[in-house]
């Protein structure tokens, strides 16, 4: 009995114990992350459960907020403060600036043909790609082209997205 109690206590205290999993997996992620002035006019990233058309880990910008269905999935794909996180926030900042210039932009955008939406998405991706390239990131053209072709309502085909990404990555 005493041995069993000792084993139980040791398993809780020893680092790397798999009994309960990793601490970062057990902790609930924040429901909101405040953004610094370098991402203005964006103010925060917030979890919002009612976002039709988005999959886990994706974001949508509405006004000064970046919204996500699942903060845990977003932070797994884009750890806060990392190069990919900062690149994504600069992408969303570009959308926020466009929305600020045209207050009804978000609602109008959803009604526009694919060509217009593709042009708007390219503005955000251009900023994101430039940031990644300037910070030594290696391109993942296949993954990015699949995302553009599948996650954005058919705005671009895989081949169209791939061609655009390769050209944009090598642009000065």
Image (cartoon, grey):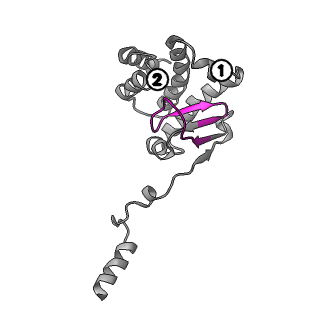
Instruction: Name the residue rendered at 48%, 29% in the picture.
Output: 53
Which is more toward the observer, 160 or 71?
Answer: 71
First in sequence: mark 1 or mark 2?
A: 1
33 part of magenta stretch: no
Query: SS class of the residue under badge 2?
Result: loop
User: How many residues crowd around disc 1 within 10 Å: few (fewer than 14), some, or many (20 or more)?
Assistant: some
Residue segment shown in magenta: 45-66
Residue in the foreground of this view, choosing between 102 and 82: 102
102, above or below 20, in the image: above
Residue 14 locus on image (x, y percent)? 37, 72
Residue nearest the viewer, comparing 135 with 72:
72
Work out which quarter of the rendered image holds the N terminus and state it. bottom left
Residue at x-position 41% and y-position 18%: 161
| CA distance for labels 1 and 2 | 17 Å
Q: Is residue 99 above or below residue 38?
A: above
Q: Is residue 7 left or right of residue 132?
A: left
Image quadrant in which you'd find residue 166: top left
Query: Which labelled disc corresponds to residue 142?
Result: none
Name the residue that disc number 1 marks: 105
Residue plotted at (44% across, 41% down): 77
| Residue 72 drawn at (x, y percent) | 48, 47
- Within 10 angstroms of label 2, few (less than 14), some, or many (20 or more) residues? some
Instruction: From the viewer's perspective, tell me whether residue 114 is left or right of residue 7.
Output: right
- Assign a secondary structure to mark 1: helix
Q: To which residue does mark 2 refer?
A: 152
């Amino acid at each position: 009995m005493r041995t069993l109690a000792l084993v139980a206590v040791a398993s809780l205290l020893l680092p790397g114990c798999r009994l309960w999993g990793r601490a970062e997996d057990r902790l609930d992620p924040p429901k909101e992350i405040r953004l610094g002035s370098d991402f203005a006019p964006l103010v925060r990233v917030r979890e919002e459960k009612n976002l039709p058309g988005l999959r886990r880990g994706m974001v949508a910008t509405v006004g000064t907020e970046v919204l996500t269905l699942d903060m845990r999935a977003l932070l797994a794909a884009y750890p806060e403060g990392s190069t990919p996180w900062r690149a994504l926030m600069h992408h969303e900042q570009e959308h926020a600036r466009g929305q600020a210039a045209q207050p009804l932009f978000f609602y109008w955008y959803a009604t526009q043909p694919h060509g217009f939406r593709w042009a708007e998405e390219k503005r955000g991706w251009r900023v994101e790609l430039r940031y990644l390239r300037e910070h030594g990131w290696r391109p993942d053209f296949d993954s990015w082209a699949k995302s553009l072709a599948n996650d954005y309502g058919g705005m671009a085909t895989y081949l169209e997205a791939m061609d655009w990404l390769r050209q944009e990555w090598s642009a000065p």
